[in-house]
Image (cartoon, rainbow, N blue to C red):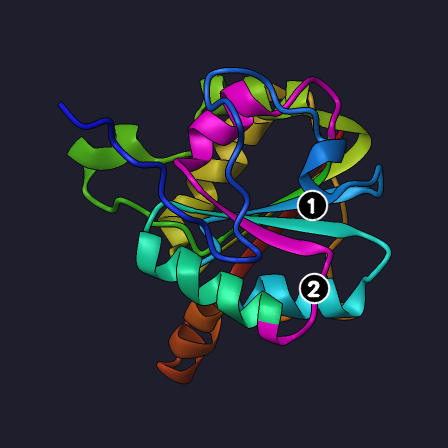
Amino acid sequence: MEATKRRTPEACEFMPSDYFDQLKVEEIFGNDAPIELDLGCGDGSFLIAMAKQYPERNFLGVERLLGRVKKVSRKAEKAGLTNCKVLRLESKYVVEYLFPAESIDRLHLLCPDPWPKARHHRRRLVQQDFLECLHKAIKPGGEFCFKTDHPEYYEWVCEEMDTFKKFTKQEWNDDTFFYPKTDFQLQWEAEGKSMHQLRYSK
């Protein structure tokens, strides 16, 4: 039987040499600059804007849908960004298994699926086991930023973080720092929905 061929990645797509071993983070971008993760990066609008604004930092988008990965990679290449890449993989797996302890400077979880039905709440990413992995992976002083348009999911995350107790809630106003809106946020605000945001530090 012919061996399965390894898919050829886009120019700005990152593919680990081994998906079952921890990454050597400096190998992703070829340097040791601070790294930020955007879990579920969608069309990459937030990721690209952040990489343009902060050229001294590295930005890795995580997205499981191949079409989106290719689209974001092409956007980053067209913009000439060397500090922006995208990885096709499940978000939880990336945080739990790929990144070494104290290696992530900031993690963004923006407008994730709220799984609104009670029987689906177990599918929500923010749970105690995920927070444990996140706390391990984030550097001391690093941050976790969360946004949602779903009030009940916002309350859920507040409760999960209060239960976890290992992060410190920080002030986050619109002028705290540069923070572009995602495609989902722009869409939902156009529909009259309000965004809820949380920022925590380790």
Quadrant containing the C terminus is top right
Q: Earlier in the sequence, mark 1 or mark 2?
A: 1
Viewer-closest of 97 and 12: 12
**Amino acid type indicated by mark 1:** Glu
Q: Kindly indicate whether the residue at mark 2 contacts the one at mark 1 (C-beta within 8 angstroms).
A: yes
**CA–CA distance between discs 1 and 2?**
10 Å
Left/right of residue 176 with respect to residue 156 in the rendered view: right
| Most distant residue in the front direction | 2
Task: Read off the residue under disc 2.
Answer: 50
Give the percent coordinates (x, y) of residue 77.
60, 68
The span shown in magenta is: 78-103
Relative side of 113 to 148, left or right: left
Q: Looking at the picture, how far across and down is residue 169, in whole percent?
A: 71, 39
Question: Does dot 2 land on a helix, a strand or a loop?
Answer: helix
The residue sitting at 52% across, 19% down in the picture is: 97
Residue 64 in picture, x, y percent from top left: 36, 45
* Mark 2 neighbour class, 10 Å CA radius: few under 14, some 14 to 19, many 20 or more: many
Residue 93 in which image quadrant: top left
Q: Quadrant of the N terminus?
A: top left
Q: Mark 1 falls on what kind of element?
A: strand
Q: Amino acid at mark 2?
A: Met
In the image, is residue 46 above or below residue 14? Answer: below
In which quadrant of the rendered view does residue 166 lie?
top right
Nearest the viewer among 121 and 136 is: 136
Q: Quadrant of residue 69?
A: bottom left
Can residue 168 be seen in this snapshot?
Answer: no
Q: Is residue 167 above or below residue 55?
A: above
Q: Is residue 182 above or below residue 21?
A: below
Residue ID for mark 1: 36
